[in-house]
Image: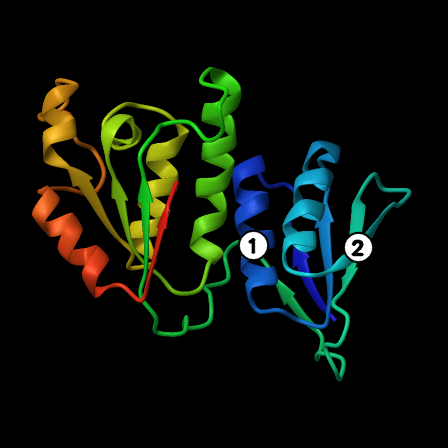
């Protein structure tokens, strides 16, 4: 059984570490968290990968989220994954993700921004992510102070290239405020979409 020890981590760090563990698709996985608000989101991540999960609170106020993946075959060897442990090399593939808004979902206030930031926190654990493009209102994520900047930096540390649409930056008056990634023309973004094995637009 693999174990992802998320105790003592912030909410985005917890989701990132859990996503890293799930990306390996172990047959059995245990996630340890000490923030009850993280339990539901981690359960959703697990369900999205085909796991059945249950959570148990121990006497030390630590939640043990135990998950099994049906049809996984032999049990995995014991392994503990921690926040300071680097990922195993990702499979070489080309998934190109395009974000066109600074929020996710139809709610455009704080909830929508928070959902998008939670989503960004899971991306370093996604195998195959090659490039990320920000267009329209999404360029604010790379040009304005906020939690998203650290998450974008984490992607860059994983070798994921960030393209920020230059015309969108100019439209919002942010051409001189870019703090993450690099400005790119629509031609370069379109060329990346052609090169990619898969394009995902949100």
Residue at x 14%, y 56% (from the top left corner): 191
**Image quarter (top left, top right, bottom left or bottom right) of the C terminus:** top left
Give the image's coloring scheme.
Answer: rainbow
Write down the residue under mark 1.
19
Relative image position of residue 77 (x, y in whole percent): 70, 80
| Quadrant housing residue 142 | top left
Name the residue at 71% across, 75% down.
78
Q: Is residue 7 visible?
A: no
Residue 197: give x, y in percent of width and height. Answer: 31, 67
Q: Secondary structure at mark 2?
A: strand
Which of the 4 image quarters holds residue 19? bottom right
Specify the farthest residue to the bottom. 74
Q: Is residue 117 at least partly visible in the picture?
A: yes
Work out whether 127 lies above or below 155. below
Residue beneath disc 2: 53
Q: Secondary structure at mark 1?
A: helix
Q: What residue is rendered at 44% in x and 64% in y? A: 127
Q: Residue at x 69, y 61 (%)?
A: 50
Q: Residue 34, percent across and down?
A: 73, 39
Residue 49 drawn at (x, y percent): 64, 59
Rendered view: 41 above or below 71:
above
Quarter the N terminus occupies: bottom right
Task: Please name whichever residue, 3 or 69, is drawn nearer the observer in this view of the structure.
Answer: 69
- The residue carrying pointer 2 sits among few (fewer than 14), some (14 to 19) or many (20 or more) residues within 10 Å by Cα, namely some
Q: Is residue 44 above or below residue 194?
A: above
In screen coordinates, is 115 left or right of 172? right
Label 1: how many Cα within 10 Å (few below 14, some 14–19, many 20+):
many
Label 1, label 2: how far apart the Cα atoms are: 15 Å
How many numbered marks appear?
2
Contact? badges 1 and 2 (CB < 8 Å): no
Residue placed farthest to the right in the image? 59
Give whichever of discs 1 and 2 has the lower sequence position. Answer: 1
């Amino acid at each position: 059984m693999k174990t992802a020890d998320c105790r003592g981590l912030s909410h985005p760090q917890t989701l990132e570490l859990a996503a890293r563990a799930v990306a390996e698709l172990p047959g059995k996985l245990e996630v340890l968290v000490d923030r009850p608000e993280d339990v539901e989101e981690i359960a959703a991540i697990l369900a999205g990968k085909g796991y059945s999960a249950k959570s148990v609170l121990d006497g030390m106020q630590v939640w043990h989220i135990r998950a099994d993946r049906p049809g996984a075959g032999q049990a995995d060897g014991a392994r503990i994954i921690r926040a300071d442990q680097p990922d195993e090399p990702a499979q070489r593939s080309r998934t190109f993700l395009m974000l066109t808004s600074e929020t996710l979902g139809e709610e455009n206030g704080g909830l929508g921004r928070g959902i998008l930031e939670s989503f960004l926190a899971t991306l370093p654990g996604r195998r195959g992510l090659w490039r990320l493009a920000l267009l329209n209102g999404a360029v604010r994520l790379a040009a304005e102070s906020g939690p998203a900047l650290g998450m974008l930096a984490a992607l860059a540390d994983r070798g994921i290239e960030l393209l920020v649409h230059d015309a969108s930056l100019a439209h919002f008056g942010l051409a001189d405020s870019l703090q993450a990634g690099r400005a790119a023309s629509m031609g370069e973004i379109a060329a990346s979409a052609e090169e990619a094995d898969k394009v995902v637009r949100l």
